[in-house]
Image (cartoon, helix red, strand yellow):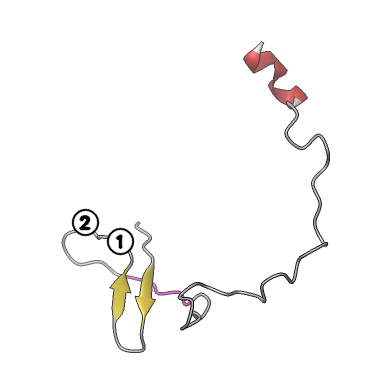
Amino acid sequence: MYAIKAIYDGVNFKPKQPISVHGKYEVVITFLEPIDQQTKVNLPFKRGCMKGKMRLDSDFDAPLEDFNEIFA
């Protein structure tokens, strides 16, 4: 099974990377979010809508005790 990203313009699919498969394949196409036509980026929600709703603990990048045996 292969997964590729492509742009669909209503008629054609244009892959975002080269495809190196040969022969015929059955495909399943899943439409994700529409693309903003001015910025050409996926906009699943309004920018900044999560501001102030997430936080990182002060020890976010501290070593995890679960890995002490592995790296000792």
Q: Say which amino acid is labelled 2.
A: Ser
Which stretch is magenta?
27-31
Q: Which residue is mark 1?
A: 17
Q: Which x, y percent locates residue 65?
A: 77, 23
In the drawing, does residue 59 fall left or right of residue 8? right
Q: Secondary structure at mark 1?
A: loop
Q: Which x, y percent locates residue 7?
A: 37, 75
The answer to whether 10 is drawn above or below residue 1 in the figure is below
Q: Secondary structure at mark 2?
A: loop
Q: Say which amino acid is labelled 1.
A: Gln
Is label 2 or label 1 in front? 1
The quarter of the picture where the N terminus appears is bottom left
User: Which secondary structure is most common in the magenta stretch?
Assistant: loop
**Are the residues tagged 2 and 1 within 8 Å (C-beta)?**
no
Figure quadrant of residue 4? bottom left
Q: Which residue is mark 2?
A: 20
In the drawing, does residue 24 fall left or right of residue 47? left
Q: Residues within 10 Å of mark 2 (few under 14, many from 20)?
A: few
The answer to whether 61 is drawn above or below residue 43 in the figure is above
In the drawing, does residue 7 fall left or right of residue 49? left
Give me the C-alpha separation between circle 2 and circle 1. Answer: 10 Å
Which residue is at the front of the view, 8 or 40?
A: 40
Q: Which residue sits furthest front? A: 38
Q: Which x, y percent locates residue 15?
A: 30, 69
Residue 69 within the magenta-colored segment of the rendering: no
Q: Which residue sits furthest top? A: 72
Taking the spot 51% from the left edge, 75% from the top edge, the residue there is 32
Q: Which residue sits furthest bottom? A: 10
What is the number of the mark on residue 5? Answer: none
Q: Residues within 10 Å of mark 1 (few under 14, many from 20)?
A: few
Taking the spot 69% from the left edge, 14% from the top edge, the residue there is 69
Which residue is at the front of the view, 27 or 48?
A: 48
